[in-house]
Image (tube, rainbow, N blue to C red):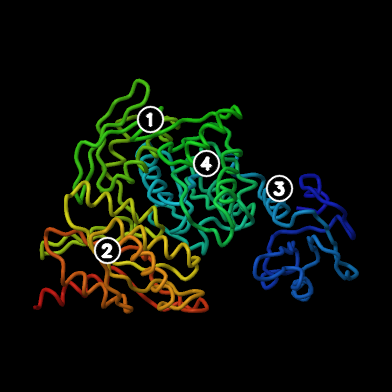
Amino acid sequence: MSIKEVLKRISYIEVEGDQNKIFNSITLDSRQAKENSIFVAIEGFKTDGHKFIEKAIENGCKIIVHTKDIKKQNDITYIKVEDGRLALSEIAKAYYENPSKEITVVGITGTNGKTTTTFILEQILKEGNIKTATIGTVGLKKGEEIENLGKTTPEANKLQEIFKELKEEDYKAVVMEVSSHALELKRVEGVDFDYAVFTNLTYEHLELHGTMENYYHAKKKLFDMTKKENIINIDDSYGQRLYKELKEEGKKVLSYSMEKPADITAHIEHMDLEKTTFIYREKNIEEKLEIPIAGKYNIYNTMAAVAVAIRIGITIEDIKKGLEKFKKPEGRYQVVENDQGLNLVIDFAHTSDGMESIIKSAKENFHKKTIVVFGVTGARTKEMQEEIGRVVGKTADCSIITRDDEVDMEVEEISKNIIRGMEKSNGEYEYIKDREKAIERAVEMATSDDVVLFLGKGNEKFFKKLGGEKIPYDEMKAVEKALKKRGRK
């Protein structure tokens, strides 16, 4: 594509240099810049792409997109724009010819539940013979093939390239997790969303957004981008607000709830560690549905997925088959099989609301004592670490506080903040710094009358040390090791 062609489809301030140059790749990483690349200089949180313009040119790049006044060289074409991230989205959308327009795209956003809802909907659509891919925490998933993307929602240039690839491979639907980071940083600006789901909004990611109000408005951006319908959980207070505002703005919106009158409702019939049966109701539909996963919050996830599937045209029979075949993502309410009669569950829950939901669900539905092994990442604020401690202390019967990712804070400091919150709610706890030893302790003390919840790591295969270095770690292997040790006693 020539610069002249792309300029017709993007917002820009001025252009200097030859507009007939051709480009065949787009990058914001100067190391990947080469001849026939466009290098987009993005002013980020940790570094500024404008510092690497000369490096991109050294690597052969002849087309530079920038927002700041910069020193210029001959034979280079410079495109000055108001917003570098918006320009990246617009250029990528133009270059890849807006591929998402020809695919049914479902965006799922919220603090908790995005991954599970995405996987449930994927399985249902596949059962309805719709070739479906997913984009999210686990990466780009096409059938059993998974490509690690490094981010929940990749940068705009990568995202548009993925959609182009999926279109060429005849995928008819894409279900994607849409993070607040992606919305705030305009990564999905060029995506044609047909449907959007709001799961919930809880205290999280304030290191980026600053306030919950900013966090909410970042999430809301997705629902301004949809072409068809928005499905909103109104049992969440922010969901109630979003539903009301979208209705007032004339958007097509559906509510779902287990506690309030809504367009879509559900009633639990049965729940155990392995499965849940509930009645799903909307308009003229009333069906008993079964999912091979426990937890009240997973009924919310299923309700949202089923609601979207119905609107896409999947029959109730295929929905039921899809739910029956659903394999929950690794590390999401993953029951650890054992021959010692213990109820052990690994889950990625890492926010105060996510942890509270899973603990309450275990207590309410299984009538068992809860033992919780958890830490909090050092990327969270001290206030958030303390709040998680307070909530877990209030909700769990017994807790073992241990390490999670350090990132910006040592385990000891994080744990002090958690314990401060724990003591505010008079929670019963132990502190064991080594996570494997903490798991060993929980497994050793557990009986068949307990549910032991290992929270926070899920399927992650590493710990982040102070500064971000990754060291190998596997929660499932740690639990299995503890079980073997217990079995030998």
Residue 288 image point, x, y percent: 24, 32
Query: In the drawing, does residue 180 fall left or right of residue 127?
Result: right
Residue occupying image coordinates x 18% and y 47%: 272
Residue 242 image point, x, y percent: 53, 37
Looking at the rendered structure, the secondary structure element under dot 1 is strand
| Real-space Cα separation, disc 1 to disc 2, in angstroms | 33 Å
Q: Earlier in the sequence, mark 4 or mark 2?
A: 4
| Real-space Cα separation, disc 1 to disc 3, in angstroms | 38 Å
Nearer the viewer's eye, disc 1 or disc 2?
2
Question: Would you name the residue on which mark 2 appears?
Answer: 372
Front position in the image: 271 or 134: 271
Circles 1 and 4 in contact, beta carbons < 8 Å:
no
Question: Would you name the residue on which mark 4 appears?
Answer: 105
Query: What amino acid type is highlighted by mark number 3?
Result: Ala
Residue occupying image coordinates x 33% and y 63%: 455
Query: What amino acid type is highlighted by mark number 1?
Result: Ile
User: Does 343 sit above or below residue 273?
Assistant: below
Residue 360 image point, x, y percent: 28, 50
Front position in the image: 287 or 221: 221
User: Does 390 sit above or below residue 405?
Assistant: above
**Where residue 264 is drawn, which disc sits there?**
1
